[in-house]
Image (cartoon, grey):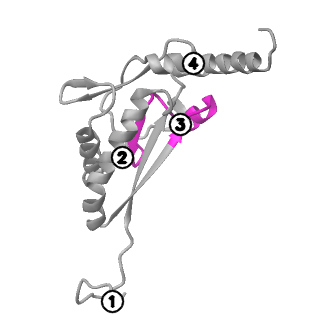
Amino acid sequence: MKMSKCCCSSESCCPPQPKKPINIDFLYLDTTVCGRCQDTEKALDDAVSSVAVVLNAAGYEVKVNKVNIVTRELAIQLRFVSSPTIRVNGNDIAVELRESVCEDCGELCGDNVDCRVWVYNGVEYTSPPKELIVDAILRDVYSPHQSVPNGEDYQLPENLETYFIAKAHKDETERQEKAGKPI
């Protein structure tokens, strides 16, 4: 096997090396009404802006996938456990799962719903601080770990089951009201 050596760092004589991917998934129930999801999306965008240039220079390419979890089936497919969720290379950045009542999502579906609470340096936040996200991205890039559980032991959390049932009922009621049908 012949190894080619590059005599310089110029792309004119050396082919560019392929970038290593960093896949970031933002999974959420709603960004139109829910303040937690809106603030998390903004913090994620700010964090990615802050680290993308450095990671690009280190040979990484950051890709952000934003996924609105609109159905129970999609939640199950993506093994969604709490809204909002950020995963770096498939790993949830939250060290522990904590939730509290989310009035916005409750209003959205017409029932009580708990959404994620983020813990950073011993303090709880309803949306993750930018620093938490930056730290999680860098930690996963430079100390990768695979904590993605296998598909056998996932079950849609009761809280999300309640959300999807209540949202479907509320949407149907609103649809019938708009159509002028008695409920």
34 vs 74, nearest the viewer = 34
Q: CA distance from mark 1 to mark 3?
A: 47 Å
Dot 2 alpha-carbon crowd within 10 angstroms: few under 14, some 14 to 19, many 20 or more: some
Q: Is label 1 in a helix, a strand or a loop? A: loop
Q: Which range of residues does the magenta coloring cover?
A: 67-91
> Of label 4 and label 1, which has the lower sequence position?
1
Indicate which label's residue lies in the foreground, 3 or 2. 2
The image shows residue 17 at horizontal and vertical percentages of 35, 75
Q: Please state the horizontal and vertical placement of residue 81, each as a whole percent of the image.
A: 47, 28
Mark 2–mark 1 Cα distance, whole angstroms, equals 33 Å
Q: Identify the element where label 3 is drawn.
A: helix
- The x and y percentages for residue 89 are 40, 49
Which residue corresponds to mark 2?
Answer: 45
Between 41 and 60, the residue placed more toward the observer is 41
| Quarter-of-image position of residue 51 | bottom left
Other-residue count near label 3 (Cα within 10 Å), few / some / many at <14 / 14–19 / ≥20: few
Q: Which residue is mark 3?
A: 151
Residue 85 forms part of the magenta stretch: yes
Which residue is at 65% across, 17% downward? 170
Name which of mark 1 and mark 3 comes first in the sequence: 1
Where does label 4 land, which residue?
109
**Crowding at mark 1 (Cα within 10 Å: few <14, some 14-19, many 20+):** few
**Camera-nearest label, 4 or 1:** 4
Dot 2 amino acid type? Asp
Does the rendering let one see residue 85?
yes
C-alpha separation, residue under disc 3 versus residue under disc 2: 29 Å
